[in-house]
Amino acid sequence: MPISYKGIGIFLVFNYYKFTTEKLMKKYILTPLLLLTVFVTFAQKGTAFLHGGNLRTVFDVAKAQNKPVLLEVYSETCHVCNAFKPTFDLPQVGNFYSQNFISYKLDILSPEGQAFLNKQGIWIQSTPTLLFFDKDVKLMHISILGENNNSAQVLIDAGTKALNPKVRTSAYKASFLSGNRENTFLIDFGLMSRIMRDTVNNIAAMNAYAKKLPKNQYGNNTSFLVLQKVIADDENEIFKYMMNNLKEFNAKYDKKLVKQTAENIIMYSLYSSRGMRYSSAKVAKVRENLTKLGVDNKSITGRVWREESNAFFREGKADKAINVLSTLIDAKTDKASYKFLGDWVKARTADKTALAKAAIWLAKSK
């Protein structure tokens, strides 16, 4: 077997570090955490993503080195993520991130990844997405990567923005409040707000964008992309334009994508905290829009019954609320469902007729 100089090199490096770190431990009592940092940084080419630890380890290292953190949110099955691996391995990228950040790959499908993202209130639309945090786990910047922007400069630019308090995404709200209404900025601010599940600022940014945009551009490619990725409010004027001009959109774009885009906005709005405050007239508009998209009436009722019945009860129209709830009952309705419906009515009205119906449903739950 021929001699592997690479193998000899790794062997000598390992033994050198074993010998050196044993001496250092005796002299300086280095912690395992710092040893991990030294070894991983030396051993890995390109961007030195920490391995063998977890997010707690990552932020402990960040505090120890007084550096911010780069989290690359990825998926093993994501071909775009895999395409970025050699780009992260480029020397110039590795040098930049090694000097400025503690880096870690966060698997979006792992329990750790899901728990962290939920705790931070972050909704990842696509992978890879770069999340930059300071050492105290405060979000600084978000950068979404795509197939068409795979380059060393893109990665370095993302990190450079994260380091600049004036241009990173955490500064967007202040920029908006100070009057920034540039089109690209409004789209970026709206997108970042949606990723952060900040509905209030998403609506504000997208309403400002719709107001600024000429109406003859509501149906163009950029507007349709904004509808797909950014707008989350069915009261937005660009969304209303799409619903009133579905033939135009269906002729220009894939019909399935048009339907999916419109449904997503409708349901996102309905199932937000605003939905349970909808009036019955507003729910009727939701029904109308879903019907326009070709959704059948039974399916529509299955989607809106909570908000619709709640609106009717709140407006003193208990009979209409009971009619809505009654449509949910069939021969397959089980005891648990009867109990749920009975309790739902009792919690929302003092109407005697409605309560009598609730009593019948509760009796069937026993």
Image (spheres, grey):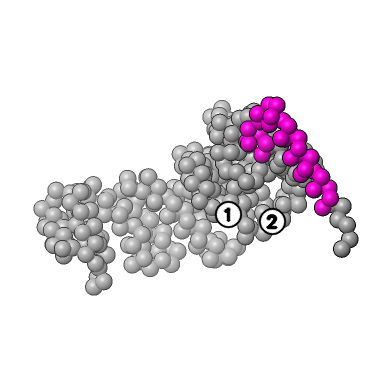
Q: Nearer the viewer, residue 7 or 326?
A: 7
* Residue nearest the observer in this picture, 303 or 29: 29
Q: Measured from the top left, where is residue 360 in percent x and y?
A: 13, 62
Res 305 quadrant in image: bottom left
Report the residue marked by disc 2.
82
State the quadrant of the C terminus. Answer: bottom left
Q: Which residues are drawn in magenta? A: 7-36
Q: How many numbered discs?
A: 2
Image position of 161 with respect to 310: above or below: above
Crowding near the residue tagged with mark 2, few <14, some 14–19, many ≥20 C-alpha atoms within 10 Å: some
Q: Residue 324: percent from the left, percent from the top? A: 25, 60
Secondary structure under badge 1?
helix
- Which residue is disc 1 drawn over? 224
The answer to whether any part of residue 365 appears in the image is: yes
Which badge, 2 or 1, is on the more N-terminal residue?
2
Look at the picture and state if 263 lies above or below 48.
below
Q: Tell me which amino acid carries mark 1.
A: Phe
Residue lying at the far bottom in this picture: please name it: 331
